[in-house]
Amino acid sequence: MSVRFERRSVLKKVLIANRGEIAVRVIRTCRELGVATVAVYSDLDRDALHVRLADEAYSLGGQTAAESYLNTEAILDVIEKSGADAVHPGYGFFSENTDFARAITERGVTFVGPPPEAIEVMGDKISSRHAAERVGVSGVPGRSEVLASPDEVVAFGDEFGWPVAIKAAYGGGGRGMKVVAGPDQAAEALESAKRESLSYFGRDECYVERYLAWPRHVEMQIIADTHGNTLWLGERDCSAQRRHQKLIEESPAPNFPDDVRQAMGEASVKVARACGYVNAGTVEFLYQDGEFFFLEMNTRLQVEHPVTELVTGLDLVEWQLRVASGEALGFTQDDVRRNGHAIEVRINAENPAGGAFTPSPGTISRFLMPGGPGVRLDTGYASGDTVSQFYDNLVAKLVVWGHDREAARRRMLRAIDETVIDGVATTLPADVAILSHPDFVAGEHSTNWVEQSLDLTGMVSVGTEAPPAPATPDGEEAAPRVLRDVTAEVDGRRYQVKLWVPDLGDAVVASGGGASKAAGPKRPKAAASGAGSGTVAVPMQGTIVKVLVVEGDTVEVGQTVCVLEAMKMENNVIAERAGMVKEVRVQAGESVGPGDVIAVIE
């Protein structure tokens, strides 16, 4: 591809209103362009990788996302202090929040993304359906109004057939999406979807649509400038999913007719132009039986954007910054070329054993990264960093390129084999199972395939070896003092300074990442018992969002006792035996740790 530009940007200093690997990703491109970077961080992220790499870093305070990365006033204050002239929102958090984008632009600061008006249209999945329909792009049959009650879900299901899907109107990435099998599940599913949506996106509006039985998730990357140019760069197949959240993405899509590709690309451009879109974005579709249906438009950079970068040779973050600077795209639709095949696996801190994909927060005691030809790793963590229960559990994205799909698949298996992550469980064993399965090799999987067809019952989780216990000084004598690099905050800004401090030898000082338990008596850990235990224990660190039983209730095997939120996902904690609830030890809003007993059944 012939691209015409000088490698510079008119933006001088970019604040990245995010964390983790996407913040690191943006910082790296900014450095290559000579653009200064500003990181923001919560109390738990004080020593995170994105903080260490940025030119400047400022504290937002707080631990949870609501207290930090979703605190508009705190971010605006950092913009003022740092003198940043642009804000890159990454993905998640405020990336598709109209009010945040307006708050940025009203201060004369560049928002590296679409205009607030485009976010308003496409950030709301209901209004985006209307916009697509106006330009002749059909969506999945659904109810294009905000749900007011479970009765509306039941009425829709009775009319169009079960199951149906409840979705977050301001969401994406599978967050806040619940599949409802029948009328009796409607109330609980809607309540859960609203909770997840509010927690992750700050809004709880939901809508309902038909749930397709065996679709593929195919999305189209677009980019548009302020000079009237809107291009589609190619598709990504994101059909390997669990809980409606992507595990593996690839480009180009396998077994995908070129005429459908062209039609989908043109449809994505129509949708983008319909809302006056500018900057990088993704138009998502469901593809089944030769037809595609508009699903939604993500008005931001996607997690899986690296696969498009590897097959096109474009740096999408660079073009985001250039478009935000007012530059025209230096190429046309005819210039876009896609070469070879790219595959990305998301490395999430989850235990996939038995297909449960249980969140696994904790400290990474060892992280050995892969390398070699055609291998790229985007991560926000290193050895010693902690994956907190309060944020998304994406640890890294492993991306490979090959001259064709089979070459890329084999290269990915080799790269996974080189990757070592200890201290937390990860999805890597499930990724290997997916990549090695004949259905995936043949490109015959769907969005439901992992949960309906992939057998993970015999899988043993790896990577959960406990980190070494920190050494403890005896405290008998005053320790000698040594010169150390120490992190300090002055007026909220992070500095690295040298201080003479007590020499603690090999002692390890815990910092960031770990969430302290709530004050109060420590709950006993569950005994190592098999199925049928009378104690109900939580499998991971998290927050109780709902308790569904009271003392004296009678429960059955498999009945949900409480709902636990960990890493922005809701998980049902179930009873392993039938009987009467003798004791309930938690209440909604309380923090718990792995193995904590929350109820006793006799």
Image (cartoon, rainbow, N blue to C red):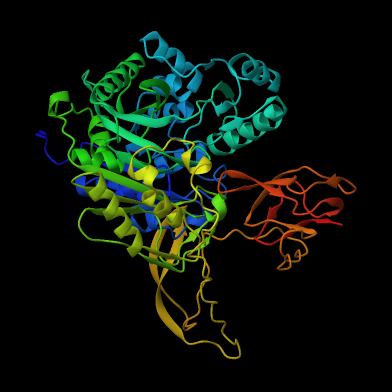
Judge left or right: residue 339 versus residue 182: left
Q: Image point 18% across, 46% down: which residue? A: 403
Q: Image point 45% across, 21% down: which residue? A: 120
Total labels: the figure holds: 0
Percent across and percent down for residue 322 are 22, 34
Judge left or right: residue 44 versus residue 557: left
Residue 194 visible, this angle: yes
Question: 319 and 261: which one is in front?
Answer: 261
Outermost residue on the right side: it is 552
Residue 83 visible, this angle: no
Judge left or right: residue 191 versus residue 398: right
Q: Image point 30% across, 35% down: which residue? A: 253
Above-or-below relation of 523 to 280: below
Question: 301 and 248: which one is in front?
Answer: 248
Above-or-below relation of 278 to 344: above
Above-or-below relation of 145 to 548: above
Percent across and percent down for residue 211 are 53, 25
Specify the quadrant that holds the C terminus. Answer: bottom right
Percent across and percent down for residue 342 are 26, 44
Outermost residue on the bottom side: it is 477
Question: 149 and 458: which one is in front?
Answer: 458
Percent across and percent down for residue 69 are 49, 43
